[in-house]
Amino acid sequence: MSKIYHNKLVNAREMVKAAHEGKYAIGHFNINNLEWAKAILEAAQESNTPTIIATSEGAIKYMGGLKTIVGMVNGLLDDLNITVPVALHLDHGQSLEMAKKCIEAGYSSVMFDGSHLPYEENIAKVKELMDFANEHEVSVEAEIGSIGGEEDGVVGEGELGDPNQAAEMSTTGISMLAAGIGNIHGKYPEWWKTLSFETLQDLQAACNMPMVLHGGSGIPQDQVKKAIELGISKINVNTELQLAFRDATRTYVEAKKDLDDEAKGFDPRKLLAPGFKALKNTFVELTQMFGCYGKAK
């Protein structure tokens, strides 16, 4: 066994296992740039909260590549003296090649999303990835069914997960399982009413392991808490952070503070500061709802 990831990163296995046993959920927060990563890490440290930060394949391209992301995250962990458990996770990896590249670059956790493949091919690839991931002590998330909507080019029809597939996936050694339970990426449309709790119960009875709720932004709080009670141990958030950042930035611009040349309101450090603060506040609100707030050992 050899760890490729270094410095202070940990894999997500123990944190999601503890969440599953303790009936709470770890927050997974997609990052898009330095402000995003720094805000989440600062908020996690200040609140003593274990955290998963993640990048989609689209975000990896946007930020310049894997070396840039791994270097930035590890640098922040050191310079900010982060002592809470933090995993760096690949979100919706569409190929084994990308998952392996992330592991080799220093990610401590990866998701292989084979939900677009025939199930037999999906689980065969998960098993192949597990051999590689276990060599480097990296946690793995797999997916059955699919998450509705679109995120960074990944489109899902929203098929519900199959309990028989969940049971088989649980034998592969993965640390967490994502499954379609009526959840959707992005903003939820007006016609959407509820998660399929019956499906979630059946899936959890079949696999008895930490499960992942994708599309966590905008689901009513009572439904989130019920999902956690039924076995959801990791909740993915992206849109909610983006909206918080947008609203805070819009308020700053509409107040014309960016046009105050004397105060240098155009300085990116000032222009991005309200959004940065909004990210931290949203992190606190969500982790309190998920129950993971303050749970770092």
Image: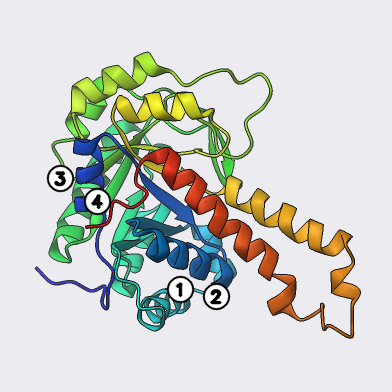
- Mark 3 and mark 1 lie on one chain; the one further toward the N terminus is 1
Spatial CA distance of label 3 from label 1 is: 27 Å
Spatial CA distance of label 4 from label 1 is: 22 Å
Q: Mark 3: few, some, or many residues within 10 Å (few <14, many ≥20)?
A: some
The residue tagged 2 is: 64
Q: Residue at x 34, y 31 (%)?
A: 228
**Amino acid type of the residue that numbered disc 2 sits on in the rendered structure:** Gly
Closer to the eye: label 4 or 1:
4
Question: Residue 173: which numbered mark, if any?
Answer: 3
**Amino acid type of the residue that numbered disc 4 sits on in the rendered structure:** Met
User: Do labels 2 and 1 touch, CB within 8 Å?
Assistant: yes
Position of 7 with respect to 289 (left or right) is left
Question: Residue 15: which numbered mark, if any?
Answer: 4
**Amino acid type of the residue that numbered disc 1 sits on in the rendered structure:** Ile
- Mark 2 and mark 3 lie on one chain; the one further toward the N terminus is 2
Q: Quadrant of the C terminus?
A: bottom left
Closer to the eye: label 2 or 1:
1
- Mark 4 and mark 2 lie on one chain; the one further toward the N terminus is 4
Q: Is residue 152 visible?
A: no
Q: Give the residue furthest to the top.
A: 198
User: Do labels 4 and 3 touch, CB within 8 Å?
Assistant: no
The residue tagged 1 is: 69
Return the x and y of residue 48 as percentages of the image width and height.
Answer: 34, 59
